[in-house]
């Protein structure tokens, strides 16, 4: 697949915004202090949001040296759709995405390797007896 023009421009702007927000953007040889506000990309229905997310992840994986990327969804069908789209794009992403069943499942994956691309539904992330996750996360974390 190849990005349409609106995806190409949106993804490049999103990557630049992410690097700027995270403090990893160099201007005139100096890193700019980030404000931690990456922004939002808005697309209409059927405009290729899933593929834009794949293209974004592919570029940001290279730019931030394989950060932890957590894709949080709110529905089973959306979680499966996005996971399938990312799984079919392994060559671009240079890794296999992981679909975590719950917070503890995600924690176990992160113990093994903090780098990677993880999918989890919001309802499974927020649990009453939440376990502390910070020791298992990489310094560079992106939420999609």
Image: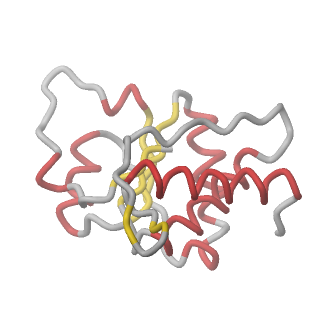
Name the residue nearer the viewer: 139 or 98: 139
Vertical arrangement, residue 136 with respect to residue 61, above or below: above
Image quadrant assignment for residue 75: top right
Q: Residue at x 56, y 41 (%)?
A: 79
Q: Residue at x 41, y 50 (%)?
A: 142
Name the residue nearer the viewer: 76 or 82: 82
Question: Percent x, y for residue 62?
Answer: 50, 75
Image quadrant assignment for residue 64: bottom left
Q: Residue at x 24, y 59 (%)?
A: 139
Q: How is the image coloured?
A: secondary structure
Vertical arrangement, residue 50 with respect to residue 138, above or below: above
Q: Please indicate whether residue 43 sits to the left or right of residue 128 in the image.
A: right
Q: Residue at x 35, y 31 (%)?
A: 124
Name the residue nearer the viewer: 37 or 95: 37
Vertical arrangement, residue 20 with respect to residue 89, above or below: above
Q: Quadrant of the N terminus?
A: bottom right
Question: Percent x, y for residue 100?
Answer: 38, 49
Question: Percent x, y for residue 37?
Answer: 44, 38
Q: Please indicate whether residue 53 sits to the left or right of residue 139 in the image.
A: right
Q: Please indicate whether residue 54 sits to the left or right of residue 113 in the image.
A: right
Image quadrant assignment for residue 89: bottom right
Q: How many marks?
A: 0
Q: Residue furthest top?
A: 128
């Amino acid at each position: 697949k190849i990005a349409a023009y609106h995806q190409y421009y949106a993804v490049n702007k999103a990557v630049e915004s992410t690097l700027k927000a995270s403090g990893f953007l160099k201007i005139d040889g100096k890193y700019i202090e980030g404000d931690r506000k990456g922004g939002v990309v808005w697309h209409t229905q059927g405009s290729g949001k899933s593929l834009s997310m794949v293209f974004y992840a592919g570029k940001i994986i290279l730019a931030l040296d394989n950060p932890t990327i957590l894709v949080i969804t709110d529905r089973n069908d959306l979680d499966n759709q996005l996971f399938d789209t990312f799984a079919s794009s392994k060559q671009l992403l240079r890794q296999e995405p992981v679909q975590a069943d719950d917070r503890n499942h995600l924690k176990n994956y992160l113990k093994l390797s903090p780098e990677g691309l993880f999918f989890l539904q919001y309802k499974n992330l927020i649990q009453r007896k939440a376990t502390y996750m910070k020791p298992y996360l990489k310094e560079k974390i992106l939420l999609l």
